[in-house]
Image (cartoon, helix red, strand yellow):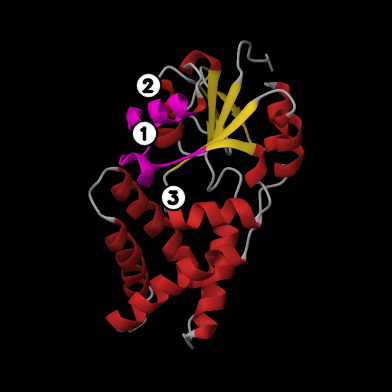
Amino acid sequence: MEKLNGITDIFFDLDHTLWDFDKNSALTFDKIFKINNIDIDLDIFLSHYEPINLKYWKLYREEKVDKASLRYYRLNETFEAVGHQISKEVINRLSIDYITHLTSFNHLFENTFEILDYLYQSYSLHIITNGFEEVQYGKLRKSNIHHYFKTITNSEQVGVKKPNPKIFKHALKVANVRADQSVMIGDNYEADILGALNTGMTAIFFGTYNEEIGGAVKQVDNLIHLKKIL
């Protein structure tokens, strides 16, 4: 795989790219269901929750739901889907407990430390995330990767979410780097890849093979393979 030239700064997405959101989220639900005495099959719940959560995050990116609605309705819709009767009060309590306990678990994707150690020697590293500000910093600190990153740009700081060009331009400005010297690495084709490309950045897709990406965008399914590109 041909290496990228002229790159000085690397911008990472956090959830689903470095921080293993699905694994940590599952452990969090197991914990808060026990705390709140919710008797439900976790695997069945998660099989419905994960696509519902992605749907609501897409709506959130598109400014069609606000933060509070995302937190409530992703749970409400999942409990309805599995046929579990639950009160609005309990859903609200679970939504708070979920955010409170999410950073109790901080599993990272395979080779995260190895690739950050490698890239840190030659590049300036940064984060651009749509995640909630109060949670994202906790994830970075508690997973012991905060020190790798010179800047952290959060959508709540900027007032817009990826793929809006404003968040990428803000991140570039804070990092004091040009778009043509920068690469964005993320798992979401719309938010990370198209958002970066539309700002003049290079992009690398992280995830399993995706036909949408095509040959124009480099792609890795394990972070360690970034060594072949950067």
Between residue 124 and residue 31, name the one nearer to us.
124
Q: Nearer the viewer, residue 102 or 134?
A: 134
Instruction: Report whether 3 appears left or right of 135.
Output: right
Q: Main secondary structure of the magenta part?
A: helix
Give residue 131's mark. 3
Q: Which residue type carries mark 3?
A: Gly
Which residue appears farthest toward the left when viewing the image?
Answer: 64
Element class at badge 2 = loop
Q: SS class of the residue under badge 3?
A: loop
Q: Quadrant of the C terminus?
A: top right
Residue range in magenta is 152-174
Q: What type is the residue that disc 2 sits on?
A: Asn
Res. 198 mark = 2
Whether the residues at callouts 2 and 1 have beta carbons within 8 Å, the answer is: yes
- In percent of width and height, residue 164 lies at 33, 32
Tell me the SS state at disc 1: loop
> Residue at coordinates 41% horizontally, 45% vertically from top-left?
130
Q: In the image, is residue 206 above or below residue 76?
A: above
The residue nearer to you, when weighing 180 against 217, is: 180
**Is 195 displayed left or right of 30 in the figure?**
left
Would residue 83 be visible to someone looking at this image? no
Does the CB distance between marks 1 and 3 fall below 8 Å?
Answer: no
Earlier along the polypeptide chain: callout 1 or callout 3?
3
The crowd level at tag 2 (other Cα within 10 Å; few <14, some 14-19, many 20+) is: few
Residue 163 is labelled as 1
**Image spot of residue 107 (x, y percent):** 66, 57
- Residue at left 39%, top 34%? 190
Q: Is residue 227 visible?
A: yes
**Disc nearer the start of the sequence (2/1):** 1
